Amino acid sequence: MIPVTKPFLPDIETYKRYTEDIWNRYWLTNNGPLVNELESELKSLLELDHVLFVTNGTIAIQMAIKALDLKGDILTTPFSFVATTSSIAWENCNPVFVDIDPNTFNIDPELIESHITPNTTAILATHVFGNPCDVLRIENIAKNHGLAVIYDAAHCFGVRVNNKSIFSYGDICTTSFHATKLFHTTEGGAVFTPNADVNQRLFYLRNFGHDGPDKFASIGVNAKNSEFHAAMGLSNLPHIPTILSRRKSQYLYYKSNLENLGLTFQSIHPDADYNYAYFPVVFKNEKQAKHIQNLLNNNRIFPRRYFYPSLNTLPYVTPQECPNSMAIAGSILCLPLYHELTSTEQDLVCRFIQKELRQ
Ligand SMILES: *Cc1c(COP(=O)(O)O)cnc(C)c1O
């Protein structure tokens, strides 16, 4: 069986050492030493001023919308994981979809301005599969129209653009450390902001609004993560350079084997240090994609339709036309890609696709 993804697991002895420390301290959660250690390691690795570790990547987006006190319409992408849109709706804002660029799979910056109205308060864009959005152009548009910018960077661990961590862009940037992501803490996520005041608001939001034991500075929720999750993160972090370099060779191996078959690959931002986290392939049409999916499934290989469906079709949003997103969501498959995937397994996946498309 070849699944679409498989979580990375560190050496169990490393994790055990961290858990023995937890046993000795009886400190399991609530801003513990391992949570602090993980946050400071991430700050120095990513060269960021502020990092807040939270329970997952979805609550990170909800906190971002709350911290910026957004109301009304938020311009967003229809081609993302459902959490990007559901968080907007959850915070009682209205998702307004801007179609994607069919080459980058990201929100098309050309189309943003024509969607701005007096009700628009923010842009919430996803760096799809770790491919950076046109961050400089989006920053410019936002500045000219007085809009906030939030990035969902759930796929982006290890990505840099214009020589800075991708997490440094936007008023707030969020990420996920879910078990399926390139860097994970089992469940988890983070919020990043360059602004100290915004960071302070996020800090209160994460922990019931607590400002000291019996004092509350604001509304809040429980989004703090535990020592066990931090221990998994600290155990995984030293493996990141190996994971990144292996991912790159696996990605390039797929690409070289699947060239000249009429498939479309994602165009990566020219100024990015990319993380090669996923291997998405766009087929000629939905029929071909489903056919290949069935063929692979019958051979115990499980690519994923990701992202599918296009989010403008969700039952709780106002219907909007997004032809590029609809076409790509219908005809895309993410091929199996994870640290332990071997080149023999990649050959097997490629051979089925080659055989079918060369006929
Ligand atoms: C995984 C993911 C999320 C949600 O993160 P969780 O940690 O699973 O809540 C949000 N957006 C995108 C693009 C994702 O891939």
Image: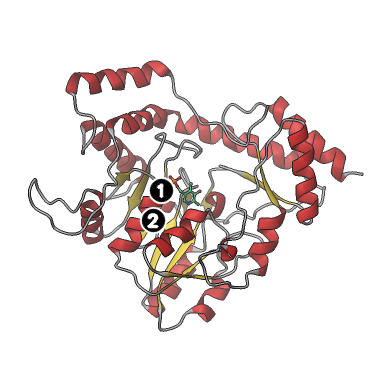
Quarter containing the C terminus:
top right
The answer to whether the beta carbon of the residue marked 2 is less than 8 Å from any atom of ligand 1 is yes
The amino acid at mark 2 is Ile
Per the image, the residue denoted by label 1 is 57
Could you tell whether 187 is left or right of 133 in the image? left
The answer to whether the beta carbon of the residue marked 1 is less than 8 Å from any atom of ligand 1 is yes
**Helix, strand or loop for disc 1:** helix
Could you tell whether 175 is left or right of 333 in the image? left
The amino acid at mark 1 is Gly
**Residue at the (36%, 57%) spot, across then down:** 62
Residue 290 horizontal/vertical position (percent): 76, 48
Q: Using the rendered image of the protein, determine whether residue 258 is visible from the camera's viewpoint.
A: no
Q: Is residue 187 above or below residue 52?
A: above
- Residue at the limit of the structure toward the right, as seen here: 359
Of 326 and 42, the residue lying toward us: 326
Count every numbered label the image shows and give the total.
2
Residue 315 horizontal/vertical position (percent): 55, 63
**Helix, strand or loop for disc 2:** helix
Could you tell whether 165 is left or right of 254 in the image? left
Quarter containing the N terminus:
top right
CB-based contact (under 8 Å), mark 1 and mark 2: yes
Q: Which mark is residue 61?
A: 2
Q: Residues within 10 Å of mark 2 (few under 14, many from 20)?
A: many
